[in-house]
Amino acid sequence: MSAPRPEGGRRPALAVFKLASCDGCQLTLLDCEDELLNVAERVEIAHFLEASSAVRPGPYDLALVEGSVTTPQDAQRIREIRAAARFLVTIGACATAGGIQALRNFADVEEFRATVYARPEYIATLATSTPVSAHVPVDFELRGCPIDRGQLLEVITAFLAGRKPDVPNHSVCFACKRRGTVCVTVAHGTPCLGPVTHAGCGAICPAYGRGCYGCFGPSGSVNLPALIPLLRRDGMSEDDVRRTLRTYNAASFAEVEGAPS
Amino acid sequence: MTHRGSRVLHVGSLARVEGEGALHLTVDDGTVTGAELRIYEPPRFFEAFLRGRAYTEPPDITARVCGICPVAYQMSACRAVEDACGVTVGGQLAALRRLLYCGEWIESQILHIHLLHAPDFLGVDGAIELARTQRGHVERGLRIKQAGNAILEQLGGRAIHPVNVRLGGFHRIPAAGELKPLAERLRRARDDAWETVRWVAGFDFPEAGLDHTLLALAEPGRYAIDSGMPTVMASPGEHGIPAASTAPLPLRQFPVYAFPAEVTEKQVPHSTALQATLGGERYLTGSLARYAISGRWLSPLAQEAAREGGLGDPAAGKVCRNPFRSIVVRAVEALYAIDEALRIIDAYEPPSRPYVDVPPRAGTGHGATEAPRGLLYHRYTLDADGLITAATLVPPTSQNQAAIEDDLRRLVQSRLDAGVRDTEAELTALCERGIRNHDPCISCSAHFLDLTVEAVDRPRRSPPCP
Ligand code: SF4
Ligand code: SF4
């Protein structure tokens, strides 16, 4: 991966877009209180509706996309965003793995629609919630529900410097060891998805005495079949295991699960 | 624009709001005949997929409805499920929950004030532009916001979608003294927040009033955040009191379990969200409602700030009915949340266990708390094994939508009546301000819809995509 460098010494144009999501990942950018104004000085914020009314059309040097594709309009919109962006990064579980709204992929959307809305015919929605990469080529995917502030800054900085972001692919277990947290599974028999979950959060849950519930999605080398008996041993029923894997990154865990829906 | 004549104004993508929405306004022969706040946030079906999940899951799952107020979702979810299971969480665990919620109030109110709302009063596009000329104000805002986030991070594990909340309490609770460093930071933030009250109180406020019925939780002795009884303040119109009056009006209360009987949600083809009404009447929830109903329960410090900020004396029951001044009310609420967080930290003694047990049982439970932008109601029905069979979430923005639309109608009508000839751009800016007065959070697409039938309109602005 190589980052584009804008010509003529102008500041690179940053755009932030939102599809179906909770806003949490783009809020992460506003939560970088110490760095926000510095970042804003180094880039041109060309489109970021949550932060500014001033928007301009593309092309953009870097587009950050939050949220998954759940409507025909958004399927079209992501193609337009791609066409306008030199470099497209998805931020968060929604944009990278379909997000929590991908739970519809395992159900009957018509029935969902009728459950929530008295007049379902007014609702335009697709039967699935899909990640951005299912629609257009993506240059980099940042995981997490929500993403980690430090990793987001790393991605933006790496882009500005024209280098590859340093976002390791190992599991939460590594981060847990580095943090010096006593393993909750070994010490307390607490079921934990840490061994199969992508690092990035800094292993927060075990540090707070609970098992990882997989909000960063599967890590690079996942051995789910080895973990499942352990989860069962620690008291999870088969249904519990399935539900836990199918939450914030339902689609991507299902992929490695290899199980039919 | 011409004074008379028919026209359609369409603002294709609202900026500086959370989530995605649009505004559609119809003026017919000098009269505003339609003001529609359109929520085009795609539906995410939370209520549908919560069915079949375990009763322990709603706090983590519903947090994902909104990245701006995840704690509000976690707290309303806990209250509702615990209610179904017949468990009440009290003492220091309840105090810690309130502390976590204060963190969210600080973070969210300050975000709205400094990053989303203040630029309206200062004629700039956003906080980053504002930082070029008034860097000190923006930096101060970021500092206070950071103090709110520090509470969320320490007690909740992280600022967005905290991981430490569970039914009955927390996974891990702070040891004695562990919260002290937080207190130092909050004391600085308290001074900063007082500065913010002064700053926003000095803005130029257009004359405006509102005659909506107000709804907020209330409880004697303290400003309602994490608990309380739904309380309704009658609307001024009915009592011959002008819309902008600061006089209090009669209150009426109902238990949380009566919420579904009192509040009806209706899906209408020309609205873009399920609209809630109180017995058929539009109403407003959020900062203005809370301040009107519970102002006298603010801490002495926050009351003093309210007086200095030009809101009148909350102890004497003064209310604020100018929606543009909601920014001052929010600043007072942020100051209160800091003050309250400090009080809780001072009085903190670790309880013996981080949570109380919440065994499942069949039944229905109701829970309501005060999200920064208004009352957030959850209801769950559980079976005997603790699996959820039905879930309902009523976010504040769907409750406020009819009132916001009415405000916009009123705003534009008053300009037309005064013979002001606004340009399209001026009118757009005015309406966007009217919307931001209420801090709508339209990410809550648990319950919002995307309209397939579009009214005829002439887009005057480029669509949100390139
Ligand atoms: S990934 Fe999670 S935090 Fe990010 S937008 Fe989606 S739901 Fe929100
Ligand atoms: S669920 Fe796992 S990945 Fe998510 S914050 Fe907890 S430990 Fe980190």
Image (tube, coloured by chain):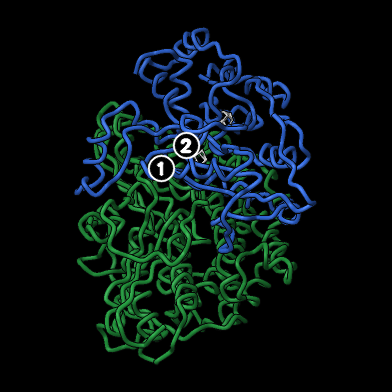
The vertical placement of B145 against B309, above or below, is: above
Chain letter corresponding to the colour blue: A
**Badge 1 element:** helix
Quarter occupied by residue B226? bottom left
The vertical placement of A194 against B447, above or below, is: above
For image coordinates 75% across by 42% down, the residue present is: A5
* Residue A41 shows in this picture: yes
Which circle marks residue B243 in the picture?
Answer: none
Q: Position of residue A23 (x, y in %)?
A: 51, 48
* Residue B167 shows in this picture: no
Which residue, given by chain and number where applicable, does mark 1 sit on? Answer: B78
Q: Of A174 and B207, which appears nearest the observer?
A: B207
Q: CA distance from mark 1 to mark 2?
A: 7 Å
Residues tagged 1 and 2 counted as in contact (Cβ below 8 A): yes
Q: Residue furthest bottom?
A: B418
Q: Position of residue B80 (x, y in %)?
A: 34, 45
Quarter occupied by residue B341? bottom right
Same chain, labels 1 and 2: yes
Q: Of B194 and B174, which appears nearest the observer?
A: B194
Q: Position of residue A151 (x, y in %)?
A: 68, 36
Dividing the image into 4 quarters, which one contains the N terminus of chain B? bottom left
| Chain at tag 2 | B
The vertical placement of B17 against A65, above or below, is: below
Which residue, given by chain and number where applicable, does mark 2 sit on? Answer: B166
- Amino acid type at mark 2: Arg
For image coordinates 45% across by 59% down, the residue present is: B13
Label 2 Cα neighbours within 10 Å, binned few <14 / some 14-19 / many ≥20: many
